[in-house]
Image: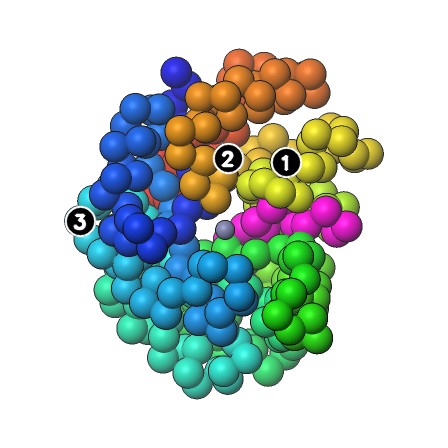
Amino acid sequence: MIRKIDIHLHPKNDDPGLEKYLKVMDKHNVEAGLVHGLDDAGWDCGFKDTTSNDEVVRAVKNHPGRFFGTVCVNFGLGVEKTVDSIREYSDKGCMGIKLFPNSGFDPNDDKFEPIWQELEKRKMLVFSHCGWLATNDKNPSMRLASLDGASPFHFEVPARRHPKVKFIFAHFGGGATYLETIVLTSRLPNAFADTCPGWGRWVFENDMPGLKSMPREKLLYGTDNASENYGIDEIWWTNKLMSYGFTQRDIHIYFYENSAKILGLVP
Ligand SMILES: [Zn+2]
């Protein structure tokens, strides 16, 4: 089995420290994972867990070198609170922030500049959910269900101003906005994207225009906890990317090396 790093994992209610998950990773040759907290605002999809940032810290502390973590912050709570959380969780071992701009803020807004400065100072990365969400049945008018600032172009200004901060667009930047991912990853050295389902896989399933020009050193393997599906996932992605002209070496950098560099496991 191919060596893999999963750049997109979350703690689960029935496995908060990801102890069980680590065994699944061992079985499928997933050497490391970047674990992300979930949004406290609680988009009602059954993932709500107000302590998830602490669970991220627990996984990282218990398994150094295997789990790396980001703290989920909500810019909507204001610059001061956000910077406070970043400092607190950076000191606890988180290497980046997880964003969910669907909760109603625009990362491109100039007022957030002190946040990016703090991240640059602490050499932290940015990992953002991108793309449309299924509507919230209980409250269809909730802004959480909209696209809002959750697409790559909403990160262009901070990404230009802070070239040392790495920006990773989850779900390949979203289905309707995946071209923004191709533009930014082609032009900005600090822009990356994962292929996490649904939209991240969907764009490849549908062979959307432009995907062949995606810079291969910017493409990251992420799954939202593939669990026992890692085996079939590996076969599917290998076949798909080979049909795009990827070599064995390109397959290796997608599954492993691009993320290993971001996590600091290789130079
Ligand atoms: Zn996720």
Circle 3: residue type: Asn
At 62% from the left edge and 55% from the top edge, which residue is drawn? 130
Circle 2: residue type: Tyr
Is residue 134 found left or right of 167 in the rendered image?
right
Give the camera-side residue of 93 and 43.
43
At 82% from the left edge and 34% from the top edge, which residue is drawn? 209
Instruction: Tell me which numbered mark, 3 or 1, is placed earlier along the sequence.
Output: 3
Q: Is residue 31 above or below residue 101?
A: above
Secondary structure, mark 1, is helix
Which residue, given by chain and number where applicable, does mark 2 sit on? 221
Q: What whole-number distance in Å separates the C-alpha atoms at marks 3 and 1?
A: 31 Å
Secondary structure, mark 2, is loop
Circle 1: residue type: Arg
Q: What whole-number distance in Å separates the C-alpha atoms at marks 3 and 2?
A: 23 Å
Q: Residue furthest right?
A: 209
Q: Quadrant of the N terminus?
A: top left
- Density class for disc 2 (Cα within 10 Å; few <14, some 14-19, many ≥20) is many
Residue 29, visible in the rendered structure: yes
Give the camera-side residue of 205 and 127.
205
Q: Is residue 205 above or below residue 248?
A: below
List x then y, in percent, for residue 45.
53, 60
Q: Quadrant of residue 155?
A: bottom right
List x then y, in percent, for residue 69.
34, 54
At 52% from the left edge and 29% from the top edge, which residue is drawn? 254
Residues marked 3 and 1 touching at CB (< 8 Å): no
Which residue, given by chain and number where applicable, does mark 3 sit on? 62
Q: Does the magenta portion include 69?
A: no
Q: Residue furthest left?
A: 62
Q: Which residues are magenta?
A: 162-177
Instruction: Tell me which numbered mark, 3 or 2, is placed earlier along the sequence.
Output: 3
Which residue, given by chain and number where applicable, does mark 1 sit on? 201
Q: Does the magenta portion include 171?
A: yes
